[in-house]
Amino acid sequence: MTLCKHLKDACDKCPVSIKCVQRESIVSDVKVRTLTDIQKVVEHYKDRLGVDKNDKQWDKKYFARHSAAARQLLDLFGETEKVLLAIDVVYKNIGVKGMWWNLNTVIKWAERVEVVIQDELDKKQKRKKAALARKKEQQEYEEAKKNAVPMPEEYKKKFKELMKGSSL
């Protein structure tokens, strides 16, 4: 469906083949909203609690309280990724058992959690390096396969004859 210059879906005044230039410029100016680090931490906490990410009532009621703790966690760990891993570690140790916890609990566990976080980051980095090595190896294989010289027909025939008598 084409749009007219009057910002309507279909317009009798405009030819069908014209797209509305005004509408396209409006759509292209819309920026995708990115979350701040504090919002990412609180969203991750909500996810671990089992709260819907779009629950506006929860945000209205609890976001301010948890954003202060999220800021402290970001100051403690320095990186959002480390904070998210810390939340996961506390959730695995406390939340899974059905015990009550919040972001302040993660702050209290910070020293104990830091070693586990570093191990997780090291594992993640090793997996990433291994994936890159596999990808490079695959590319080299594809390149070699592309540049390979095919076996001449006479050698193929000799090979088949030799293989007839073998037990392989």
Image (cartoon, helix red, strand yellow):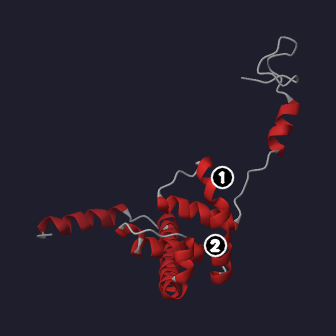
Q: Is residue 21 visible?
A: yes
Q: Secondary structure at mark 1?
A: helix
- Of residues 30 and 13, the one nearer the viewer is 30
- Residue at horizontal 59 percent and vertical 60 percent from the top: 43
Q: Is residue 69 above or below residue 48?
A: below
Q: Is residue 132 visible?
A: no
- Of residues 134 and 20, the one nearer the viewer is 20
- Residue at horizontal 79 percent and vertical 17 percent from the top: 16
Is residue 28 rendered to the left or right of residue 162? Answer: right
The image shows residue 50 at horizontal and vertical percentages of 47, 56
The image shows residue 61 at horizontal and vertical percentages of 63, 55
- Residue at horizontal 49 percent and vertical 73 percent from the top: 131
Q: Secondary structure at mark 2?
A: helix
Q: Measure the alpha-carbon separation of dots 2 and 1.
A: 16 Å
Quarter of the rendering occupied by the C terminus: bottom left
How many numbered circles are shown?
2
The image shows residue 106 at horizontal and vertical percentages of 53, 77
The image shows residue 6 at horizontal and vertical percentages of 87, 22
- Of residues 82 and 152, the one nearer the viewer is 82
Is residue 107 rendered to the left or right of residue 49? Answer: right
Q: Is residue 152 above or below residue 80?
A: above
Q: Of the residues under marks 2 and 1, which one precedes in the sequence?
A: 1
Q: Quadrant of residue 24?
A: top right
Is residue 64 rendered to the left or right of residue 156? Answer: right
Label ID, residue 69: 2
Q: As shown in the figure, which amino acid type bears the numbered disc 1?
A: Lys
Q: Are marks 2 and 1 in contact (CB under 8 Å)?
A: no
- Residue at horizontal 42 percent and vertical 64 percent from the top: 150
Label ID, residue 60: 1
Q: As shown in the figure, which amino acid type bears the numbered disc 2?
A: Ala
